[in-house]
Amino acid sequence: MIARLALALGLSLLFSWGMAPFVLAEFAGNLIIAGNGPELTTIEPLARAFEKANPRAYLDVVWDGNSRPVEMVKSGQAHIAVTGTAAQDLAATPIAWDGIGILVHLSNLTKELTKQQAADIFSGKITLWSELGGLDTKILVIDRPRNQNVREAFESQLGITGKITNSAKVIGPDEQVIKTVVGTLPPLAAVAYLSLSQGLSVVASGVAVKLLSIDKVEPEGPTVKDGRYPLKRPVLLLSKKEPHPLAEAFIQFALSQAGQQLMADTYIPINEK
């Protein structure tokens, strides 16, 4: 009870007075944040900003594409897991929204899909681009590893959990996914999915890829924000339900104005009106 009152007082001072070091120094100790998805580019600066404001707090961001962050929290190897889906027995706090983009080669004749067509492609019911107004070329489906949160959200959004075609090529790193879409032979055959923030960044940089519209809605930040774009996932912080003062302090920082401004560099802030 005393620990919770101290935490509440510290958080109250934090949001009343800003990021004054003498206030935030109340939050001290070690915190391990685990993840395996595209959120690293946002979570890392968020952790460093929290440390800067809290000189006696040490945050270790453990990121590995092959790791299982949720299991790490359950087993006590980490305090917070960054993911896109909730997990039984853990508290889940949404801190932002991200879309999920469907990526093809820039020269692919297909410009848009319905949500059902996307489900049929990735479940193997549609196998040729000609069925979608494209060339008479077999579709190469690129899937993501089962432990990656973007896959769980994608399957759930399309209603194909556990049904992605066995012929799909499984690729982990986004960079390799993009290279495969660009360089697959025969040309224009590959289709993949990835974090929309990553996809938009790649398109803006001039790589020969594009993101397909879904149900006639362009994949963009504003359409994710207003709910029109149908493929999206939350960015969640998962922690044990038993109170951990430093974990709770970091979660509240992520939800604060300062934290949400950092999130806005990549994602749609959860508290943005």
Image (cartoon, rainbow, N blue to C red):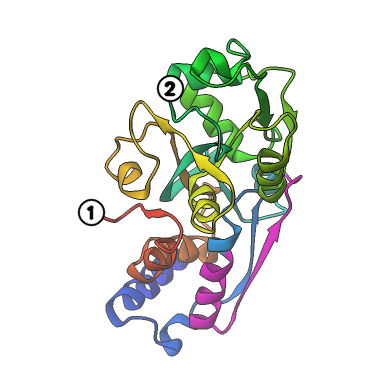
**Within the image, what quadrant is residue 70 found in?**
top right
Camera-side residue of 216 and 254: 216
Asked which secondary structure carries label 1, the reply is: loop
The location of residue 264, given as percent across then percent down, is: 39, 61
Q: Residue 253: horizontal and vertical position, in percent?
A: 42, 67
Q: Name the amino acid type tagged 2.
A: Lys
- Is residue 86 in view from this perspective? no
Query: Which x, y percent locates residue 267?
Result: 43, 54
Task: Please state if 177 lies on the left or on the right of 237 as rendered.
Answer: right
Q: Earlier in the sequence, mark 1 or mark 2?
A: 2
Q: Nearer the viewer, residue 79 or 209?
A: 209
Confirm whether residue 107 shows in the render.
yes
**What kind of residue is marked 1?**
Lys
Q: Which quarter of the figure is the C terminus placed in?
A: bottom left
The CA span between labels 1 and 2 is 27 Å
Which residue in the structure is indicated by mark 1? 273
Question: Relative to 154, does residue 139 appear above or below in the rendering?
Answer: above
For the residue pair 182 and 9, the one nearer the viewer reads as: 182
Residue at 66% over, 39% down? 181
What SS does tag 2 mark? helix
Q: Quadrant of residue 28?
A: bottom right
Residue under pointer 2: 115
Q: Residues within 10 Å of mark 1 (few under 14, many from 20)?
A: few
Kindly indicate whether the residue at mark 2 contacts the one at mark 1 (C-beta within 8 angstroms).
Answer: no
Q: Specify the quadrant that holds the N terminus.
A: bottom left
For residue 214, the mark is none
- On the picture, is 9 further left or further right than 48? left
Q: Position of residue 227 (x, y in %)?
A: 30, 37
Question: Magenta segment range?
Answer: 44-67
